[in-house]
Amino acid sequence: RGWGHAGSVAGVQRTMAAAKRLGEITWHQPQTKGEGPSPRSGHTITVDPRAGKAMLFGGCGVDAKGEPAVFNETWLLTTQEPMMWENADVMGDVPSPRWRHTATLLPEDRGILVFGGLYKGKRYNDVHVFNVEKKEWILKECSGTPPHPRSHHTSSLVSFPAEPPAEGEDGDGKPKEDKLYVFGGYGGAGSARDFFSDIHVLDLLTWTWTKIGNVRGNPPKARSDHTASVSGTTIVVQGGRGWSAGKGSTGLFDDTHLLDVVAMEWLEPPGFNPEDDDPASWPKLPSTLWNHQAICVASVPSDKLFVFGGQKSPREYSNTLAIMDVNSNSWVPPLVAGSAPAAREDSAFAYDPATCNILFFGGWRQKWLNDLWTLNVAGVVGPPYAVLKAEPYTGPLTGGTPITLRGLRFIESPMVQVRFTDGKREATVTGQYQSPEAILCKAPDFTKFGAVEVVVRVSINGDPFTVNETTFIYYSNTQAKKSMAFGPGLLSGLQAGRKVSFMLQAKDLSGKLRTTGLDPVKFLITGPAKEIEEPEIIDFGDGTYQVSYSVPAAGEYQVQLQIDENPNDPDSISSDVRGFPCSMAFSRMWEKQAPSGAAARLKGYLRLHGDAASGKIFAYVKDKGVPDYGVESEPEAAPTAANEAEAEPASEQGVEAAVGEVAEEKRAPDMVYILHLASSTWSAEVLSESAHAEPNFIGLRDSKLTALKAAGVPELLALAMVRPHTTEPLADWSLAGKLTGPAPAPRTGFLVEVIDGKAFVYGGFSTDGESAFDDVHVLDAQAMMWTRLYSAEIAKDVALSRRTCFCGMKIVALAKGAVGDAVELVDVLDLAPLLDPKNSDFKAIMLDSMQKQLTDLAANVNGLNQAISIEIADGDTAALHKVMKGLKGVRDQTAQLEYITDQMDDMLAYMAKKNMGKTEPLQRKLDGIVEVLSTTKKAAPTVRKAVKSLQDAEAMRTIETLAEFEEKMTKEHKAFLNGEVFSNTLEYNTAYSKLNATAAQMAELEKEYTKMWALADLFEFGDKLQASKDTLAKMQDERIKIKTVWDLQCIVQSQLDEWKRVLWTDINVGTMEDETKTFTKMVRGLDKSVRDWLAYRGVDSMIKNFAITVPCVADLKSPSMRDRHWQKLMGITKKEIDVNNPKFSLNDMLALELHNFVDDVGEVVDQAQKEDKMEQMLIKLEATWKAIEFQFDRHAETDVYLIRMQEPDFEMLEDNQLVVQGMMASKYLATFEEPVTKWQKELSAVSDVLGIMLDVQRKWAYLETLFIGSEEVKKELPADAERFAGIDADFKTLLKGFNAEKNCVRACAVEGLIKKLELLTGALELCEKSLADFLEAKRRIFPRFYFVSQTMLLDILSNGNRPWIVAQNVNAMFQGVKELSLQGDPAMTVHTMVSNEGEVLNIEMKGPLLLEGKVENYLNKLISRMRDELRVQLGRAIDEYQTKGKEGKERVLWLHDHLAQLVLVVTQFEWTKLTDKALDAVSAGKRNALEVYRQDQLSMLDDCIKAVQGKLDKLNRRKVMNVITLETHSRDINIGLINQSVDRKDHFLWLGQLKTRWETGAHHGSDGEAPDAFLYICDAIFRYSFEYLGCAPRLVITPLTDRIYITATQAAHLILGCAPAGPAGTGKTETTKDLSAQLGKAVYVFNCGPEMDYLTMADIFKGLAASGSWGCFDEFNRLIAEVLSVCSIQFKSVLDGMRKGGDSFRFAGIDYYQHPDGSMSFITMNPGYLGRQELPESLKVLFRPVTVMVPDFQLIMENMLMAEGYTTADVLAKKFFTFYNLNKDLLSKQMHYDWGLRAIKSVLVVAGTFLRAEPDKPEA
């Protein structure tokens, strides 16, 4: 099948030439290079567009010699020009020769699938896949029910896209599927032959065949030689031949059938009725056809099916080309160019989407053919995509409009071209692929062509431009200065919080109205509001725009309206529309009232209720009782929500209970205050006597709930709206989207009212409490819609200070004034205008605004005209002034008036266009106004000339008048500043009276100034009145400022008078401090210019004095004050007070004038507080240490009880000592000096005794087990044992004393106790020194004691005569030995050693060893016996390798009988021996000796791998795996020797390997009498040490490991250490341990750190040298610099002894035993890490450095896989290495992702487990 949808081919570079004209297809016979296939038919040709090649396979024809043949050649044809044939040299399972098979291109670069076919009567049903890139055939093993062998069939590939999971289902959904459908054909099982009509499906994911047994619909008759083409998920079957069914049925078909593979149904054509005489059918072929070719090519909007060739009747061949439109199911007459090929059948047909060519090769017509043809179908199918529309469809002439082209099946590609043309002129731009349905581009510049309508087409990857097209309209660019804005949203009288709108009419450069939209319009408004909502701009698409906006606060705003005239130019700047920028003023919608009468107070209990009928607000106030000091006072307001106006009142009982003891105080009567909104007056009544009883607020709430439900508000929302809102917010006002419109934001503390069946919501606070709302929302429950009537901003503190409630259609807010709590401010928001329908009808608003504007404009223009037309009589100054005023108006207002007339003209045109009422009368009126304005402009110059002389004379008189007024203003200002209001001699009440008089006087001056300014402006003398203007402004400013000063004076004085009456016991200092700080901020916040006024200085001094006094009051209220402190204070102030008097008040305290004695007061209070604290602490110490006692713990299993102090008590001791020290340093110690000194001594005694006693206990407990419990120690150290006996007696006596007196303080106060403890400490130190010398002697005898802890060593020595106990610590001295098997009674004879892995070393050759005598002696014997036993067993293992192991051929059986350690030595020995032998043979002329041995190696290695695959116990598996590890390295070495053509044993490649030999020789410690194991590397020789190491895993040896081996062994040979350095995880330590295992050495690994000192290092070096062991110091450079410096001397002493030879070396002046095998030290370092030291040069020279970098991971993986039993380890290791490298590079760098050796090992071990669990599964 062919694919026309090039989108399925990623990245194909197209070279298709465009068709000559639309609908045309072209035949062409191309020229090819190379020798092509021989003539044939029944072959297949398949195009792989990714590879750019077509594959031709099989067929029946004649070969190059002219002989008939059936082929299985694979030919490749390059499909791009120039075409070239290639007879491919293919690999793999090539299909057998065949013809009349099928070949199908698989998706996703998976190759070409060949199925079935025929050869010499044999038919096939096998499946082969050909990889074009690799030129490789693969035979696919398919499961399931395959089709019977057949030929002449069809195979159709159908792809099913992936599907997401259904809603509510888990998982990833349905994955993408590809299936191959095989239909019809001729063949059968065995020798049976028949035509088929069955359908088989091959799932290409699982490679499973399925037979479709139940297909609905009317199926085709059985047939072969038909065609099957794929369109989407439909297979179109056409023609073919089958069995004839008698007369009238030839068995030749021209029918068409459609199979829907999704529904698995043969589809019926439209109108099909089987009972009709001639039932409807799908369009038939032009004639009966078989052996023809057909292919369906994807096209937009309908796929095209091409049919060519075949037989029409017997031996009548066709070369007719037919095309069917798949969507319409109709045949389309082709428009063909070029000559068609000759008629034929059995040719091959394939579609190349890269070139839009159908390739056509060979066939049969009385002879076999081999001609190649192409049919270019681009003119019919076009590119496989279509363009449908452009978004937007219009743009400016200057181009650059971002356009989204909507279409179908666009292909992702960087090569996208978009063409714009009007049929004559064109412009092409580059596009950008976005999705299969969208391409992005920018419109080209069409300025030179003008505003026209163009068509748009698309080309991708060089395809022809699409047949489908869409339109795009260019328009002239908008000009901002020509455009006009008009409408009610630009008029005066606008209100804040209310949305308004206006229109913008866009015009082009010539002033013509724009008829399309999409102009980038910006509306910017700035002003006093903190945050302004984004304006709403509606584009009507006809050049008009509606701008709607609102401002949340009153004030003057700057407004900008801009249009980007060239929106697609990134450098273009938006321009202002005509008339902009401008300023606009917005007023408050709230109406302010200042009611008179007895106002309510916003304090204490207050509830509001609004009565709509009467228009009154009722405020219910109750006094709940507070302390009263002789004057009328009111309670402080409890914190409530600002809008809690109608919430239920608190319980009377609760309030009374809260006041408690003051319940009997005198209370004011409960009141009701009534606000009459109409008259703005207050009245007050006693609630008990009033007719206006307090309503039941809970009942009102229930009534409101009923009203909400009656209005249709959903019950859930209604309940939420009436619940108390002080804390819990209401968040979901829309009920999860059920209510539409702008719902209120989540809030709390709001008001709700039901008016006329609708719910109104006002105000509240945000859920976080940080902001408040001043907005009104209305819910129309019948329409299920919210509407926002009003929205403004309000400060949170303002909202909190108000009380609000509904009163009918009004919302009333009450607030107190600047001074006191009385309600002085009342705001009223009338909702009626907001609900008036006319105010929301844009048409009505426009009409009203136009009429109002015309009226105002006419009055203005007519007034100007009348003013300049006045006749002026002689001396008529008033007439002159009127004319001059008119002339000035003409001069100043002409430009603005012309703008307004143009604006109104555009507005009327818009109204007429939108049919907004009768505009003709308005237009006539406007025309009349324009005519009057024109007349006035023309007359103005004449009038100005006529009045010139009169104007000049009047100007002189005006100058004199202005000068007189300026002099008067100066005098008034001076008198104002000298007035009493600026002094500090007045009371604030008097000052307010004088300020009121001053305000009236200034009002008169302002009236006079206004009159003078009008006169000055008329004559343009404004500068001569500037001084008077400034003076008046300054006087007003000064009046306001001095009023502010007196306001502050009033507030402060009132508050101070109230505080002075408060009793001393009731003073709340915190409140006073906060208020005083507020006063201080207020006075500092006053303008700096007032600071020289005496009134300011007075209030400032008052606040400062009190601010100084308040902290003193706070301090003096301290409970620490005693009578002695008050006496001291009275002595300082020289005044007497009685603080114990119950009526003592703050006023009495202020009489001391504390602000003059601040420091003295602080000193007195500080003394009181410190003394009080000291007193309390002494009481606490007494109580604490009275209860603290020593604790006693039993020592081991004795009757001795050691003392200790509990951790909390010890921390208490330390804390109390610090406290007492602080008290001793206090300057107020005198009062409590005696008890403080006592406690200092007692606590110090406790601390000292406890410290010494704990040290004595520790040393005694440590030495007691040795000097009393160990007979050997007593025997070796008799004098010290006797000394310790005395110590023991004294120590136990002390303990008895502590036990008798457990209290810590009393027990430690015993006279002479510390001296006794010091004597015990000295005696114990003498015993310790003797013990240390004793242990050092033992270590020198058995050096491995240097490597065990001192505690363990003491345990070993103490139990030396009990070997079964010593054996418990054997692993610390013998690292490979887990335990010793002891026998006898008592168990003292060693028979076996058990390794850490559980392997058993039987001491059978040398016999068991009796452990008797001193422990250090029999441990030395145990080492000797272990080594002798291993040496003897090694000799036996070597002998049995030749016999039982059959020289390695039965190695797997042999190794089960021997220790793992010896098996590895024998393996290495045999490898060395046989490689030496092979090299000798090579030297003798046998060139392939190494290769022969390598093959033997591989055979033996395979045996080991197979053994691992079987069932083995853990030890044997480990043993075989270790053999594989070493043998793999040996194999790699031998391969290297072969590759390097090594032909002698002294070649460095061989010398540099670690070789094991079993030989007799008196060298390196061997006696030369018996064979021994030696290891050779370069010029170094080592004797195998026979340390039993067990069956530990072995390291994979890489080239890096080999280099480390060479460096380390050469260092040992030169008697130096080795220093591997490199990053962590590179194997430094493990390589060291593995090398020691190769040499049979004991190696001890030490993790170095700063805590190790030079003595520790000395013991280690001595132990290594004396025991002949190796040491590995991990992270050696973590040692501190001082220790490293000493280490250089210590290690050099060891090396010098080894170089000297002999059996001793000198270390720190003492001779120590030196082991004949010598020792070796490795230091591993991680360079550059934090906390690492640089080694001193003296130490560096003692070690040979080697750098360790990243090992060969792939080699390690291969080795480990082989050890786990994988036979294809090399391939798998490469894959695994690549996989892990990709993970490391691409995945997260977080620490928990580990791609190192540890993770690799873990995974591969699991992989080995899987392999052994499922041995039949393939390894990959």
Image (spheres, rainbow, N blue to C red):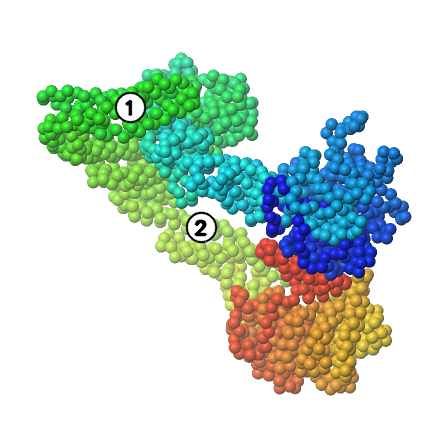
Whether 1690 is drawn above or below 53: the answer is: below
Q: Is residue 1333 visible?
A: no
Circle nearer the viewer, 1 or 2 = 1
Compared to residue 1174, the image places residue 703 above or below, namely above
**Residue under label 2:** 1177
- Residue at the spot x=86%, y=38% of the render? 244
Q: Nearer the viewer, residue 282 or 1386?
A: 282
Whether residue 678 is visible? yes
Q: Is residue 175 left or right of residue 252?
A: left
The x, y position of residue 302, in whole percent, is 65, 37
In what quadrant of the picture does the C terminus appear? Answer: bottom right
Q: Secondary structure at mark 2?
A: helix
Callout 1 crowding tier (Cα within 10 Å): few <14, some 14–19, many ≥20? some
Three-letter code, disc 1 = Val
Q: Which residue shows up at 49% across the image and 43% down it? A: 427
Residue at mark 1 to residue at mark 2: CA–CA distance: 98 Å
Q: How many marks?
A: 2
In the image, residue 121 lies at what x, y percent?
87, 51
* Quarter holding residue 659: top left
Q: Quadrant of residue 545?
A: top left
Q: Position of residue 553 (x, y in %)?
A: 37, 31
On the image, numbered disc 1 is attached to which residue? 930
Q: Quadrant of residue 596?
A: top left
Foreground: 652 or 1203? 652
Q: Nearer the viewer, residue 742 or 1658?
A: 742
Q: Mark 2 belongs to which amino acid?
A: Met
Who comes first in sequence, dot 1 or dot 2?
A: 1
